[in-house]
Amino acid sequence: MDMNEIKEIFFQECEEQLAELESGLLKLNDGDRDPETVNAVFRAVHSIKGGAGAFGLDDLVSFAHVFETTLDCVRSNKLEPNQDVLKVMLKSADVLADLTNAARDGGSVDDSRSRALVKELEALANGEVPAPSATVEVPAAATAAAPAPTDESGFAPIPFSFDGFDDEEEAIEGTVYDVTFNPRPELFAKGNEATLLLRDLSRVGEMSIHCDTDALPSLDQIDPEGAYFRWKIAVKTTKGEDAIRSVFEFAEWDCDLEIKVQEAATDAAERAEELPMIPVPFDLSMLDGAGSEGDADGEEAGAAANATATTAVAAAEAVSGIAKLAGAASRGDKKDAGAAATAAAQATAAAGAAPTIRVDLDRVDRLINLVGELVINQAMLSQSVIENDANGTSSINMGLEELQQLTREIQDSVMAIRAQPVKPVFQRMSRIVREVADMTGKSIRLITEGENTEVDKTVIDKLAEPLTHMIRNAVDHGVETPEKRVAAGKNPEGTVRLTAKHRSGRILIELADDGAGINRERVKQKAIDNDLIAADANLTDEEIDNLIFLPGFSTADKISDISGRGVGMDVVKRSIQALGGRISISSRPGHGSVFTMSLPLTLAVLDGMVVTVAGQTLVVPLTAIVETLQPEASAIHSFGASHRLISIRNSFCPLVDVGRILNFRTTQANPVEGVALLVESEGGGQRALMVDAIQGQRQVVIKSLEANYTHVAGIAAATILGDGRVALILDVDAVVGASRGQSLKPEMSLAATG
Amino acid sequence: MASKKGEQGSLKLPAVLDLNEATQLHGKLMSLRGKALVIDASAVERAGIQCIQVLLAGAKAWGEDKKPFSIAKVSDAFQKTLQLVGMSADQLQAQEIR
């Protein structure tokens, strides 16, 4: 496996871990004190650190280490995770994410920021803890020794700090463990390196090793990549069996590992006679990559010196020495218990999660494309069979029906592969809110709802950018400063609400703030100043609100880092439209604004009703249609010069002549001769679309019109029908909008694809 | 591989002796079989267990052939890796091993 691929997987996992981290911290922020939540947060940071170590991402490792240390204080209940603590932690999570991104994409991270946070974290770890850093550092150091999956190209530096070692613990006689380590070939096949494992083991404590080479075959028969050596190792350590086990954490399934406590110290000498044990020196610095060895050696020396010093002190002051021993022992226990708990938690997490695989998105897309072709082909096949077979009871027809059901199911399943919850995007937004609120000195709470709403992966990916823009706008422009809010009699803490839900086959994302709302006077004035509208234009409130979507519009008095350069909302609108979605705004002065985005769930297929309009075949998305009816002459009423209404069950509904609006014909169609499709538009109102006839209902594969031709107003996309002809898919909302008098000008058209 | 009696072979080990290198190293050793061999390990920066296995098997094979097999120069890293896995450079000299 290529090194870069492994790294890519690592970064993907990092993303997941970061999401986990953030949601855990937010849960804590909301008052959740479940130890499992704390553990989850801790695990996330720990995994990132482990992986980063394997790739030599030193910045990431060192920051994660400090973060982990502080989290460990929370985990061991030494640090109460109150709001202030969590604020620092959330910021640290952000920095961790930045560092991860910097490691992946290059670029740099604001050093001063991470340094300041490191200080804050350390202060938290030290400040409120009665027993200072050493207690915290030791378990952290032990876990740091755990080898992360290594690359086969050789040694990866595992930065390793002995910072807390100038403590009396070294003075204690360690327990001697006998370790039998028999690697199997699979271990090496997975890229683990036995020398690395042994090196990490040598760091756990004083180590003697015997290598059993008896199993080695002759040169002619050797498999160069086989595993023939066996080791018997004696490790003297104070860190307990778990520390040793953690060294083999990633290897234990691929080797036979036995760890037991050696009964008496004298045994070691006897055994050493039986088997020639070679003591392994501490100075293994040559085996490290750059970086970590210096402090390891130095600290080792320091620790050793310290050890002798404390031994002397202990001898002189026997009583206090015993006290220290007791203290250290209990600390050891605590740590072991903690490690065991983590291991158990990891085990349950592993058992609970359904098995998943990672698949390249390209492969899924190829599959989806093929299934799309299959659907078209199946439709063509059934059509030609029906045409050639007058009596529709043949067995071919039955088989075809089954085929149709099967293709349908295949398609649904394939689409489900691409569907993902919007949660990750929403989680990113909470960070944006935090940061912008921090910069502008506002206090804002982000409430998210419907995070598990699923939508196509492409939509999710492309949603993040416009959403970020809008969130920034909402925080920067929408919500007022705490002083102003208090003056207006509102809660000084502003609320931004982000919701996702399914509605009529689309996903609806709403972003609501409880700020001041749009200042229409100013918006209009700005638009006039910027020559976007004529000075004497007479606009409705809604039209003024929509001015903010015009290119080059900005109401901010001064340009800030956050927003206000006038490249905001028009870009947002365009990206939403590119997804086949639409965006609308509603604002109430003094109460805030609501942005509503409606996006298609998928960009690949849709259920449509095939209709005929003025000799053309059109497809109307089935999700938009409420009902179909045959209008009667008595139900049709004229309204104004060109508008007509249809009365349905005692209520009136505007009649929209599709053929007229799309310029398929110049005269108005006679409603009585056609069929009316009652549709619900995004705005919520109902309209009756007039078409000439209904051909049928089928699933169609969406083919982008933009990609193959150009955007056509009122048309969302195209498709290929069973008989091989191209049919246009109607953009219902655009047509409805046009019927209200808005022209179908390209720049005002409401949707692109979908 | 046809070999001439008494010929002196030499092999300079690359800097990185990882898993990928093990097969190549094995091939090189096989082709040098029958010659007195001096191995130069001065450039080794990293050594993995597979290469050490191959080298040890080589030392054994040379020992069986009663040909000299010696490691002339040893880098610090190589020395330490051997020590770490519980072996000594002496074990890699040709001799009747056990």
Image (cartoon, coloured by chain):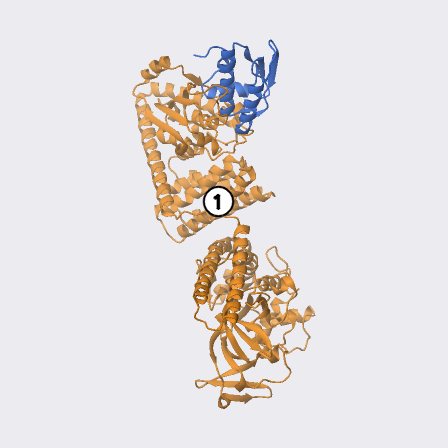
Chain colours: A orange, B blue
Residue drawn at the location 36% of the way across and 45% of the way down: A351
Task: For label 1, count other residues whose C-alpha is less than 10 Å away and answer few (under 14), some (14-19) or many (20+).
Answer: some
Q: Is residue A729 left or right of residue A401?
A: right
Can I make out residue A168 in this image?
no
Q: Would residue A388 be visible to someone looking at this image?
A: yes
Q: Position of residue B44 (x, y in %)?
A: 57, 22
Which residue is at 56% across, 41% downward? A103
Where does the image place residue A491, in percent across and percent down from the top left? 45, 63
Q: Which element is circle 1 on?
A: helix
Q: Quadrant of residue A736?
A: bottom right
State whether residue A82 is above or below residue A196.
below
Three-letter code, disc 1: Glu
Name the quadrant of the N terminus of chain B. top right
Quickly name the residue at label 1. A13
**Chain on which label 1 sits:** A
Image x and y of residue A429, in percent = 51, 55
Q: Nearer the viewer, residue A344 or A72?
A: A344
Quarter occupied by the C terminus of chain B:
top left
